[in-house]
Image: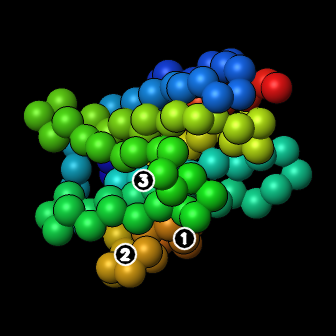
Amino acid sequence: QVQLVESGGGSVQAGGSLRLSCAASAYTKDDNYMGWFRQAPGKEREGVACFHPVTDYIYYADSVKGRFTISQDSARNTVYLQMNSLKTEDTAMYYCAAGRAGLGGACLRQTTVRAWGHGTQVTVSS
C-alpha cells in the first residue's frame, strides 16, 4: 500500500496562499488517482481536488474552483495543492489520498480512497 506524507500546512491570513505537498512512497497499479481532502471541526471530510495521472483529468470541489490548483511532479512522486485567495472557511485538516475511481469526479468521494496521509493543518485567520 502506498505511504503518503503531507507537509506545507500552517497559518495564514485571509487572502494569502499556501502550498501543500504530498510525498508518495510509490504509485501502485491498484490506484488510479491522487487527491486532497479536508476536514473542518464538526464537519465531514470532503474532497477538495483530485486527478488521474494517466488521463490528466482533474476535478475540484466547487468551493475551491479558481483558487486551488492540484499538480504533480511524477519524477519525485509528489503531489501539490497550491491554495490561493484563502478564506477562513478553508481552515481544516488537509489529507492527501490515493485511490481508485471512475472518471466524472468520483475521486472526490472518500469512499474511493485506498490510502490516507496523516494530515496537515491549515488555519486561515481574518
> Mark 2 is on which residue type?
Ala
Q: Do callouts 2 and 3 mark residues in contact (Cβ within 8 Å)? A: no
Q: Which residue is mark 2?
A: 101
Cα distance between the residues tagged 2 and 3: 11 Å
> Mark 3 is on which residue type?
Gly
- Residue 35's disc is 3
The residue at the point 88 percent across, 51 percent down is: 42
**Relative to 88, residue 69 above or below:** below
Position of residue 33 measured from the top left corner of the image (x, y, whole percent): 31, 61
Q: Secondary structure at mark 1?
A: loop
Q: Secondary structure at mark 3?
A: strand
Q: Nearer the viewer, residue 5 or 71?
A: 71
Circle 3 crowding by C-alpha within 10 Å: few under 14, some 14–19, many from 20: many
Q: Nearer the viewer, residue 50 or 25?
A: 50
Tell me where residue 5 sits by quadrant: top left
Circle 1 crowding by C-alpha within 10 Å: few under 14, some 14–19, many from 20: some
